[in-house]
Structures are given as C-alpha cells and as structure tokens.
Amino acid sequence: MTSRALSFDAVAELYDTARPGYPPALFDAVEELAGRPLDGARVLDVGAGTGIATRLLLARGARVTAVEPGPGMAGRLHAVRPDVPLVRAIGDALPFAGATADVITYAQSWHWTDRVRAFDEAMRVLRPGGTLALFWNVLDQSVPWIADQNARLRAHGGDGGHGVHGAREQGPLLAEGVVGEVRRVTWTRTVSLDAHLDNFHSHSVFRVMGEAATAAFMADERAALLQVFPDGRVEEEYVVDLVAARRPA
C-alpha cells in the first residue's frame, strides 16, 4: 500500500460526495460471471474507500464486510454506514478465515495491491466456486473532450487517465498463468461543472501535485470546459472495466 494510495484520506468527504457510483448493469455482469445472485452472498469489498461500491452491493442484497486501510476513508464509511462491518486491512493480507467469502470485490483499488499476493489471498478466502471481481470506472477516452482533458493533465505534469489504472492498463492477467474474464459496461451521468471538477480533484494525482499547481490547473480546466459545456452541465461518459476469476470448485 503506497503513500499515494493513502493520500485519499485527506479528501475522504470530497471523494465520497463527488466520485461517481456504478451502474446496475455492472452488478448484473458480476452476477453473470459469479454464476449466482449477489442477494444473500457474503461479499468482502476490499479497498472499500468511503463505501461507494459497498452501498450499492448492500442494495443488491449482499452481506458485505468492508475492508479499508486508510483511517480517513474508513472513518467516512463508518460515519455514513455505521451498520456495515468494517475491517482495517489490505488485500495483500486479508484477516479472514479460508473459504468464507462468496465474492471478493475490488472497486477502483486492485492497482494499489501486490497483485500476486492479493490474488493468492483472495483465492484462499473465497469458498470453492467463489468469485474475485475487480472493476474500474474510467472516463471514456474515445470521447473527444475527455481525451483533450486527459492530454491537458499530462501536459500539466500529471499521469493521465485521471489517476486511474484499470484493466486496460494492467490487462486481464491476475496472477501467473491466470487470465480473468473481462466485461465492459458503458454509462453516462450529467453533473454540474463544479461537481465534475470536484470529482476530478479527488484523484490521487492532485494529492501529490500540490495545492498551488492544482489550483492553477483547475482554473484553466474550468475555462476549457466552459467552451464545451457553456451551460455548466457536463455529460460524463464512462466505461467500467470488469475482470473476474473464480476459485476452482
């Protein structure tokens, strides 16, 4: 777990309120790949952050335990959903007995793990036939204004991709010789320009860029986006990359 991963603690409330959720079609795809409904499933949501995916899994009827190492993120999750079991841990060393989970999810968090160790831990904790599901919400780089925004971020000294390293960057290889099944779900949401910039601001690249550089970038970005969305309403187009693997039955 890197200091950059833990940098989200400083913006836990902003992360929770500004980050997008996930579309119902994603959880339909998880159920398809798992070969079972989420309703009634014992799910570990690892790297749960403030619980954005946790809450949606609960809404599908899953029995969720959130796993989150960051004190700020975990604190926000507990404040919003004090009823949800919460364990402070990382995916590389899950403090759970073997063969006890039906599904393990990583929403926007697998890239912070040592994926060989995390994969082995997931296979240990999953019941035979259980499913490891990794997913990332990524702004669709095939959309011209999003590609332009990404290019501006790279030019400003950021790492591009809005700080998200998803299945397209890592590929579906989960561990040595293990290739996951891949699904892709597209969806959109329309938000205010302020909400879009808040979401953008919550990404880890800005946590390490520094406040002065971030403020300068955001001012320029607001002006650029108003050229595309003069009414101040931004249509964000997303692709959710899902990679899943089952523990052999």
Image: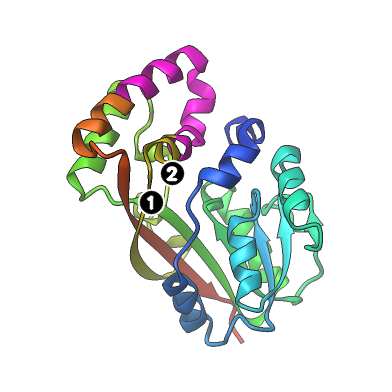
Main secondary structure type of the part rendered in magenta:
helix
Q: Can residue 151 be seen in this view?
A: no
Q: In this view, which residue lies farthest toward the top?
A: 212
Q: Which of 68 and 55 is in front in this view?
A: 55
Disc 2 on helix, strand or loop? loop
How crowded pointer 1 is (Cα within 10 Å; few <14, some 14-19, many 20+) is rated as many
Residue ID at (81%, 57%): 82
Specify the label residue 53 is tagged with. Answer: none
* Quadrant of image for the C terminus: bottom right
Q: Magenta segment, which residues? A: 198-221
Disc 1 on helix, strand or loop? strand
In the figure, 91 relative to 177: above or below?
above
Q: Earlier in the sequence, mark 1 or mark 2?
A: 1
Q: Is residue 106 left or right of residue 66?
A: left
Residue type beneath disc 1: Val
Residue ID at (51%, 33%): 204
Residue 224 drawn in magenta:
no
**Which residue in the structure is indicated by mark 1?**
138
Residue type beneath disc 2: Val
Specify the label residue 164 is tagged with. Answer: 2
Residue 137: horizontal and vertical position, in percent? 43, 54
Whether residues under marks 1 and 2 lie with C-beta atoms below 8 angstroms apart, the answer is: yes
Residue 166: horizontal and vertical position, in percent? 42, 51
* Quadrant of image for the N terminus: top right
Q: Is residue 53 visible?
A: yes
